[in-house]
Image (cartoon, rainbow, N blue to C red):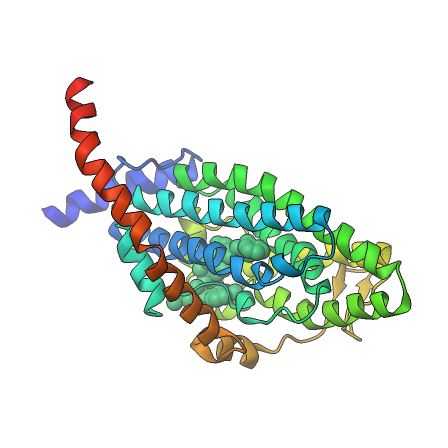
Amino acid sequence: MEQMVDDSLEDAFQHRIDAEVKIEPRDWMPERYRASLVRQIAQHAHSEIIGMQPEGNWITRAPSLRRKAILLAKVQDEAGHGLYLYSAAETLGVDREALVDMLQTGRQKYSSIFNYPTLSWADVGSIGWLVDGAAITNQLALTHTSYGPYARAMVKICREESFHQRQGFELLWHLSHGTEAQHEMAQESVNRWWWPSLMMFGPPDHSSPNSEQSMRWGIKRVSNDELRRRFVDMTVPQARALGVLLPDPELRWNESTGHHDFGPINWDEFHRVVGGDGPCNAERLTRRRRAHEEGEWVREAARSWATRHVPARIEAA
Ligand code: FAQ
């Protein structure tokens, strides 16, 4: 009997998804839908938070006040994105502290891209141009995701990511059109960030275990390979405008498909980095844990303020 009720609820749920009606926090949803969303939204939130570190390393070394102000604003935006996303995850009944703990103990993932080091100032440009460019490509599709709070969070995030991408492009443009040494710095940086940026979209469709179900539930609207292809098609003309080369001898326009062909991605490297053995995995998690410990006094102060003031406010209301 219980099974029959669940089946009919699940049918009604799938009808709503197929009719493009957003799922909201109080709506009935299959437990697997809820768990899969928590997984993806939490990984996304963790990526934004860990993603502050590579560029954050350059705030004190920005070459001008203007660049420093832009970089500070960008890194703070990423913190804000993490917070919207943790809030979206909380609407699914998970506790933020539990999610933070899963990140810090390595039980939940964050994007592979943030395990690569920022070795030169040009890396701030490459992250803005390529990493934020890849993030927007994915996140624009996610503005149509089936879960309302996640879709709405994506709209504001995408607007801010567009600014991030533009500032990265503009930074690299100046380096690329500057002295010979500056041009070389830009090119060397693009060489290092290109392939890891392509990996951000996840494994190829045929070996992506979550894709099929996530597409059926409308969590994912566009597949990993299709997003990767859109990113390549968008980025190639931008590279030309910047005057930098993309480090792929097989990259070329394919008249018959109307898209660019590109060379093979090193999936062994991807799995190694996601598995914890990238150049900066240990450093990123150690720094995050330290920041969390150092922030304990802020959480303590907020908790004691809430205990004293919130019940009084609720009574007054
Ligand atoms: N890194 O079956 P699929 C940003 C995992 S935000 C690490 O294809 P799915 C802003 C995947 O979780 C960047 N792990 O998985 C910024 C799964 O493992 P699981 C973050 C990855 O979920 C810019 C397994 O591989 N954006 O950059 C990665 O259907 C600059 C199998 O994969 C988002 O998170 C990876 N790259 O598709 C901040 C967007 N790819 O969980 C600062 C939301 C895959 O089964 C500075 N997320 N895996 O153990 C998504 O759209 C999806 O989760 C995908 C993966 C497309 C990332």
Q: Residue at left 69%, top 67%?
A: 194
Q: Where is residue 55 in the image (x, y as percent from the top left)?
A: 60, 60
Relative to 142, 161 lies left or right? right
Q: Residue at left 58%, top 63%?
A: 57
Q: Position of residue 304 (x, y in %)?
A: 21, 41
Kindly indicate the quadrant of the structure image that contains residue 92.
top left
Residue nearest the viewer, comparing 75 with 299: 299
Residue 217 visible in the current orientation:
yes
Relative to 316, 212 lies left or right? right
Tally the numbered discs: 0
Relative to 4, 254 lies left or right? right
Q: Residue at left 73%, top 63%?
A: 122
Kindly indicate the quadrant of the structure image that contains residue 258.
bottom right
Q: Residue at left 47%, top 51%?
A: 220
Q: Where is residue 19 in the image (x, y as percent from the top left)?
A: 43, 34
Q: Position of residue 68 (x, y in %)?
A: 66, 50
Quarter of the rendering occupied by the C terminus? top left
Residue nearest the viewer, comparing 23 with 179: 179
Relative to 91, 64 lies left or right? right
Residue pushed farthest left? 1
Residue 255 visible in the current orientation:
no
Q: In this rendering, is residue 193 above or below 71?
A: below
